[in-house]
Amino acid sequence: MAVFGSLSDRLQDTFDKLRGKGRLTEDDINVAMREIRLALLEADVNFRVVRAFVSRCKEQCLEADVLKSLNPTQNVVRIVLDELTKLLGSTDVELQLPATRKPNVIMLVGLQGSGKTTAASKLAYLLKGKNRRPLLAACDVHRPAAADQLEALAREVGVPVWRGDGKDAVEIAKYAVNTAARQRNCDVVIVDTAGRLQIDEVMMQEAVDIRDAVKPDQILMVVDAMTGQDIVSVVTTFNERMDFDGVIMSKLDGDARGGGALSVREVTGKPIMFVSQGEKPDSLEVFHPDRMARRILGMGDVISIIEEAEKLSDEQSLADAERMLMEGFTMDDMLSQLNQVRKMGGVRKLAGMIPGVDRALSQSGQDINDEQMIPIEAMIRSMTKEERAKPRIINGQRRKRIAAGSGHTVQEVNLLLKQWEQMDKMMSSLRGMALGGGSRQMGRGMAEMMRNMGVDPAEANKLARMSGGAVPSGNRQQRRTRPRKKGKQQKRRR
């Protein structure tokens, strides 16, 4: 979640300072609220929104029940989480497409460069996955090659396009809804309208004319998440003229402060309905305010990970998981897992959903991305079928051949095999638990793997203790395994 990265770090630092105190005073709350205010302002959140947000949080945090509780810091975090969720919209909002009308009409509006055309194709892909039959209407007749771009994106997702004569946007929209959709047996028409570099009367009037001509069931405004406080005046003007129903937040994976995204709901009262976090057709997702608030505060989004995994699960993948658990982990299994991660949005996206991982990476100065998986795939594909099934047979000579064949070094092949061995150990531990064994060995195996990946040994040992037992240090382990010498007590017994 690159857009909110800086804000997330600042808020988590503020909470870390509070956790260092046993009891909180009014001065502690005032300092924390001041830091939260600065963090939001630096993230380019509208100053009126910041003032109202901090005021609500402070009022609740200063209540006696909070300050005198056994864990006041936890209560403060809960209050900020609740208020941030309200700021983002509290509840999920779905598209309202009445079954009594065919075809339904969705109209997209927004500034040029906000990502309307791309959002149109992504929305079509999303609806197609819900057994709808969308048609895209190319009503941006001002931007050169806009219709060509929409047509290319539509081919990628397998959706038809109506572009008409490419001159009259209103007529193109009317024909798409009244004729083209019925001819092509489509039950939803998505109207992609023109945008401008700034709001002007010509653009607004054309959008109003299209709205009046096709009477859309839903009007969605596409907003660039990287836009700062200027977005407040833009969405306010659009809302006054178009009275749109919701927002699609685009470019949420971009590298910017993202304060505009936190201002839209408070300023207009309109909900954020979808967010886009990538370029792929399946990167448009339903917006969940509570999950986004948790991610901003560094609490992760495990529910979304589970949902993504459920989308990809099928009988074959379940059978593969059972085989891995009972028979062992092969290199083909590792390759399959890499492909699954890609389908779920990539390793960077998943890291942002796991509590603490995103922040730990930023603090260590490390970064992870999908490109780091390419060498692994290349080395695995350079192995023979037998080597993939039984990696333990890969000796020094085979390692040299794999390295040469994949264009990498022997050291990199050694690292890959070490990673495979750690994952295989974890599978063995899981297999032991499934067959009645304990979780102690699994905790030790996972902690060892984390240490090898560069995680602090103390943090790695915490995982082992949670699973049933800490991993002893090397010297301690040696003392335990070394045979005992005959001592004075043994001599006395004789």
Image (cartoon, rainbow, N blue to C red):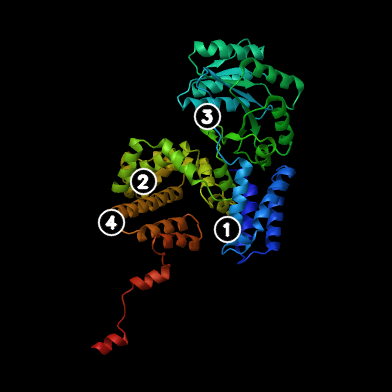
Residue 142 visible in the snapshot = no
Q: Which residue is mark 2?
A: 398
Q: Which residue is mark 4?
A: 436
Q: Are marks 1 and 2 in contact (CB under 8 Å)?
A: no
Sooner in the amino-acid sequence: mark 4 or mark 3: 3
Label number found at residue 11: none
Determine the CA span between mark 4 and mark 3: 44 Å
- Residue in the foreground of this view, choosing between 413 and 136: 136
Would residue 484 appear left or right of 168 to someone viewing this image?
left
Determine the CA span between mark 1 and mark 4: 38 Å
Q: Which residue is mark 3?
A: 281
Q: Nearer the viewer, mark 4 or mark 2?
A: 4
Determine the CA span between mark 3 and mark 1: 39 Å
Would residue 149 appear left or right of 304 to someone viewing this image?
right
Q: Are marks 4 and 3 in contact (CB under 8 Å)?
A: no
What's the residue type where badge 3 is placed?
Pro
Sooner in the amino-acid sequence: mark 3 or mark 1: 1
Sooner in the amino-acid sequence: mark 4 or mark 2: 2
Q: Secondary structure at mark 2?
A: helix
- Residue in the foreground of this view, choosing between 95 and 376: 95
